[in-house]
Amino acid sequence: MSDVKELATPTERRLESTASLLRELVAHLTQQRAQLREEWAQLITEAKLLTAMTKEEIFAEATSVYDNYVEALETGTYEALQAYARNLSERIIPRGVETHEVVGIVLLLRDVLARSLFGKHRDDFNKLNRILDAYEPAANRIAITVAVGFVQERERIIREQQEAIRELSTPVLQVRERLLILPIIGVIDPQRARQLTEQLLRGIRTNRAKVVVLDITGVPYIDSAVANHLVQTVEAARLLGAIVIVTGLSPEIAQTLVNIGVDLGKMNTVGDLQGGIEEAERLLGYRVVLTQEPATPPA
Amino acid sequence: MQVPILKQGAYLIATVQSALTDEDLRQLRDALVGQVSKVRARGVIVDVTALDVIDSFATRTLRDVAHMIRLRGAETVIVGIQPEVAFSMVKLGLSLEGVATALDLEEGLAYLNRKVKGTDHEVRTHR
């Protein structure tokens, strides 16, 4: 061991061109492609990774990952690999593939290739050392690239879903010409409150609304910051020329509003949603009249 | 930049077309208050659709305009405040207390028509 170190200290080893070593390495990996790929696919199955995919699919993906891997080693650029990792993640995330599986298979490939290098250079320990010096940083970087690509893709999907949920959480519905309803269900956090304001003001503008019924029957409680925000939203809506009617205030919310000292003259509140809509119709000049007996369901 | 003031029937319409300096605002106020009785206007519409900032001075001036015009016997309505502008105004505590607001010019006209209903100077708009 000691004389090996004397012969080739890390600095000396680095002097030998990494590029030429990598070229040699790539030639070896290209030559052994079929066998190493097979070995790797075998290991993936044994390690019970990618269980959501069939054997054929694993083999097909393994082939492209292998080729991309060797290409990244050869060219030293990671853009193609990055793009591939993103593309792969896009396809396998919906099938329930976990982060540890993706990282696991890349590390398995790294080990398979390293083993093959051990086998090839077992007689020349110095050479093996130098090859590994060239191989390891590149291999680690590939593993990181793939893992980061996968995680980023997951995060992107999560962000998209959060956005979708948020969109769904504050629907703006037109129930009559110039009358909007905003039913709100669930706790309002500051971010949701901001979004609610935005949706409400934009809704007033796009639907040319005159009256908006904000129904908070489904909101269990609000803190004073959100209550203030709500009051400001009502005020801002007035500046756009619309009247906001708040309905369904729970006793807790009523207490919060009174505690923060809301000027109740500015807040238009009605007990329940039905009352709110009736009040809104009155403000808009509608009169709902029963013109005939209510229909009965067909027999 | 001066704000053009148009006469439409019994109403005066001032359409703000770009950001206004304090001086411009004062000029607008004086012009509106002066003209309102000169042309015997029954209502004044100030259209601020083009403004993406309404600061405290602008708010106060608009409120003053509305109150002064009421004293001169006419009604004022501010129209076209953008949603973002409205919310930032409220955040800064700049509410146009006691001033009528409407979504846009059409709504503003409808508001004034309701206000001056029964007088000879009603203006009808087509929908």
Image: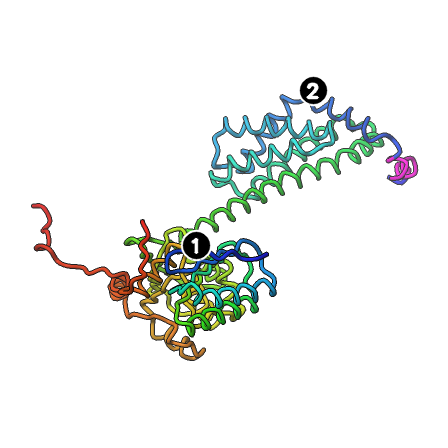
A76 horizontally vs B88: left or right: right
The quadrant in which the N terminus of chain A is found is top right
The type of colouring in the image is rainbow
Task: Please give the name of the residue rendered at 34% of the width and 66% of the height, measured from the top-left corner.
Answer: A245
A296 horizontally vs A164: left or right: left
B126 horizontally vs A123: left or right: left
Query: Which amino acid type is shown beneath numbered disc 2?
Result: Gln
Q: Chain of mark 2?
A: A
From what the image shows, is residue A34 above or below residue A186?
above
From what the image shows, is residue A164 above or below residue A45?
below
State the image quarter where residue A86 is shown: top right
What is the chief secondary structure element of the magenta stretch? Answer: helix
Identify the secondary structure beneath mark 2. Answer: helix
- Disc marking residue A202: 1
The quadrant in which the C terminus of chain A is found is top left
Q: Chain of mark 1?
A: A
- Disc marking residue A31: 2
Q: What is the x, y in percent for residue A248?
A: 31, 68
Q: Nearer the viewer, mark 1 or mark 2?
A: 1
Q: Is residue A5 part of the magenta span, yes or no?
A: yes
**A59 or A291, which is in the foreground?**
A291
The stretch of residues the image draws in magenta is A3-14
Identify the secondary structure beneath mark 1. Answer: helix
Crowd tier of the residue under label 1, counting other residues whose Cα lies within 10 Å: few below 14, some 14–19, many 20 or above:
some
Q: Are marks 1 and 2 on the same chain?
A: yes
